[in-house]
Amino acid sequence: MNNFQKSMFDKIQKNSNINPDDIMKVADKVKNANFSDEKTVRNLVRHLSKMADKPLSKEREDKIVQSIVNNKMPGDLQSLNQIFKK
């Protein structure tokens, strides 16, 4: 792992208490996932929410899932952050 990756994972762990190893496990799990399948995406969103200890309302979960399934996720970090922050 290079210094940039280590720094990024350290920041993620500090802000969310998610272990970098857990992030890598999820990344491996979703490498070949079908992101147009609502059930797959919903399970992933729920899993990540639990990992981060950040409960999502049904409405927020639905919005995130539909954005991913319909390939309408924003391209910039600020807009993406707004989806997950509310």
Image (spheres, grey):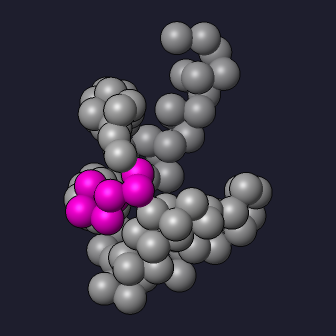
Horizontal side of residue 45 vs 72, given as left or right = left
Q: Nearer the viewer, residue 5 or 26?
A: 26
Q: Nearer the viewer, residue 25 or 16?
A: 25
Residue 29 sits inside the magenta stretch = no
Total marks shown come to 0
Residue 38 sits inside the magenta stretch = yes
Outermost residue, top direction? 1
Q: Position of residue 11 (x, y in %)?
A: 56, 40
Q: Which residues are magenta?
A: 35-41
For the question of whether residue 52 can be seen, the reply is no
Q: Identify the residue at image location x=57%, y=60%.
A: 71
For the question of whether residue 45 can be seen, the reply is yes
Q: Identify the residue at image location x=24%, y=62%.
A: 39
Q: Position of residue 64 (x, y in %)?
A: 46, 71
Horizontal side of residue 47 vs 76, given as left or right = left
Q: Identify the residue at image location x=34%, y=41%.
A: 33
